[in-house]
């Protein structure tokens, strides 16, 4: 049969391969386990955010004997500083001493004195002292007839002028969303890349690939395998992201639900780009090995690249404008992990996003044919690990 006839008969057969790999992997226990594990991790992070006191300041119990202005002032000052102060009126010194001993209060205000059991927390002490000073100042101003407007003018702060744009709103919430996104992306790129390589080596070791290649061209087989497993990974990612958003909304863990939806869309888009880039590398690596035992050694360089990209992306949560993070967000091997973080945190200008997209798409367009050539040159060679140079020449 001529080459033209072969191309006509196997046109679209990659869809059959994609469907086969999709359903085979979907039925595996490891898929169910990985899905449940992702949901458990997401649940822990979201519930910790919702009920673990994330983003809340310290809380104190303050007792007072006598007039309450100092205690009430500490409450007001604490609200501005993100500190919660609960006040308790106590009838006398004996009740105050008992409350300190049993731990129901952290300190007690006696007019111009502060009493604590053993030591006074500096935060609470600072609030009480500031409130006491304000009470004494107000008393002095009252004696001299200073009006409320004059007091307000005296307490007015200096106007603040900035020379840089303020940080985007909800920065802390967005950082938490980006952290979850990085974990999901790392797990999906690594896990499903391994599945592609494992599928290739299993077919090669069992010699099933020889039967497959009698009916389909190597490029069609490679494309079908990448698309089938990639769709499965994309579906799992959508399910997990939807679960995370719904759980966050139900528990009230997210103050900005739209940011979570946008982050989920970013994660899905960059997963597609990153998977297209890495899946070809994993498939070629699987073809270079002859036995499953050899696979770990073959994919070590790829794993290291993904791992380094993951750590750089975690660092981006603290410094999304750093030089290393910026460079990583523009390189094709690290952009799928680093760029979504910078976008969610509002640190990536539009031209860097477009440049990163162009680089990773262009790199994938160049990489896929090269990986396919290695796959073609190595998939039928057995008896030991195939060298890259030999596989490249064999496919010429």
Image (cartoon, rainbow, N blue to C red):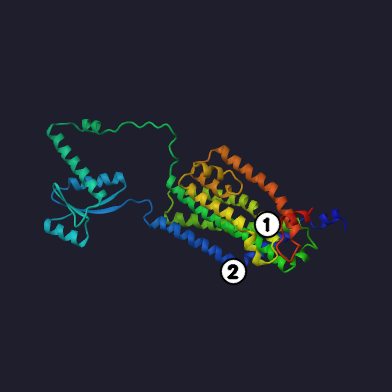
| Residue 390: image location, x then y, percent | 75, 56
Tag 2: Cα neighbours inside 10 Å, few (<14), some, or many (≥20)? few
Is residue 185 shown left or right of residue 393? left
Q: Nearer the viewer, residue 45 or 194?
A: 194
Q: State the mark number for residue 321.
A: none
Disc 2 target residue:
29
| Residue 151: image location, x then y, percent | 21, 33
Tally of numbered tags: 2
The quarter holding residue 239 reads bottom right
Disc 1 target residue:
226
The answer, for residue 3, to whether it is visible in the render is yes
Tag 1: Cα neighbours inside 10 Å, few (<14), some, or many (≥20)? many
Given the current orientation, which residue lies at the most extreme right position?
A: 1
Answer above or below: position of 209 versus 90: below
The answer, for residue 256, to whether it is visible in the render is no
| Residue 140: image location, x then y, percent | 14, 36
SS class, disc 2: helix
Answer above or below: position of 82 versus 160: below
Q: Nearer the viewer, residue 65 or 196?
A: 196
Please tell me which of labels 2 and 1 falls first in the chain: 2
The quarter holding residue 354 reads top right
Quadrant placement of the N terminus: bottom right
The residue under the point 40% across, 56% down is 50
Q: Nearer the viewer, residue 194 or 261?
A: 194
Cβ–Cβ below 8 Å for labels 2 and 1? no
Distance CA(mark 2)–CA(mark 1): 20 Å
SS class, disc 1: helix
The residue under the point 53% across, 55% down is 184
Is residue 338 shown left or right of residue 223? left
| Residue 135: image location, x then y, percent | 17, 41
């Amino acid at each position: 049969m001529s080459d033209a006839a072969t191309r006509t008969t196997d046109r679209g057969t990659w869809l059959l391969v994609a469907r086969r790999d999709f359903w085979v992997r979907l039925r595996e226990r490891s898929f169910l386990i990985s899905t449940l594990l992702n949901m458990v991790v997401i649940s822990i992070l979201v519930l910790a955010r919702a009920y673990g006191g994330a983003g809340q300041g310290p809380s104190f119990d303050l007792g007072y004997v006598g007039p309450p202005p100092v205690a009430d002032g500490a409450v007001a000052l604490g609200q501005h500083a993100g500190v919660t102060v609960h006040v308790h009126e106590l009838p006398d010194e004996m009740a105050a001493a008992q409350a300190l001993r049993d731990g129901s209060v952290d300190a007690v205000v006696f007019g111009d004195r502060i009493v604590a059991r053993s030591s006074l927390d500096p935060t609470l002490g600072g609030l009480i002292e500031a409130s006491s000073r304000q009470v004494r100042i107000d008393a002095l101003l009252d004696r001299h007839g200073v009006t409320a407007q004059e007091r307000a003018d005296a307490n007015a702060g200096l106007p603040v002028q900035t020379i840089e744009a303020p940080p985007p709103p909800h920065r802390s919430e967005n950082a938490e969303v980006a952290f979850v996104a990085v974990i999901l992306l790392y797990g999906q790129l690594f896990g499903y890349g391994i599945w592609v390589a494992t599928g290739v080596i299993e077919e090669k070791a069992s010699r099933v690939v020889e039967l497959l290649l009698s009916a389909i061209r190597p490029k069609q087989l490679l494309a079908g395998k990448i698309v089938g497993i990639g769709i499965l990974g994309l579906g799992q990612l959508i399910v997990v992201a939807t679960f995370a958003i719904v759980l966050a909304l139900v528990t009230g863990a997210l103050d900005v639900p739209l940011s979570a939806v946008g982050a989920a869309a970013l994660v899905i888009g960059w997963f597609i780009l990153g998977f297209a880039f890495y899946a070809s590398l994993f498939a070629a690596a699987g073809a270079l090995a002859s036995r499953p035992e050899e696979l770990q050694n073959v994919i070590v360089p790829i794993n290291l690249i993904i791992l380094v990209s993951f750590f750089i992306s975690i660092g981006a949560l603290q410094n999304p404008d750093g030089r290393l993070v910026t460079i990583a967000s523009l390189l094709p091997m690290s952009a799928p992990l680093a760029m979504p973080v910078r976008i969610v945190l509002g640190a990536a200008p539009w031209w860097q996003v477009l440049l990163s997209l162009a680089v990773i798409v262009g790199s994938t367009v160049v990489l896929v044919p090269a990986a396919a050539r290695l796959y073609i040159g190595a998939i039928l060679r057995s008896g030991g690990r195939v060298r890259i140079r030999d596989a490249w020449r064999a496919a010429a």
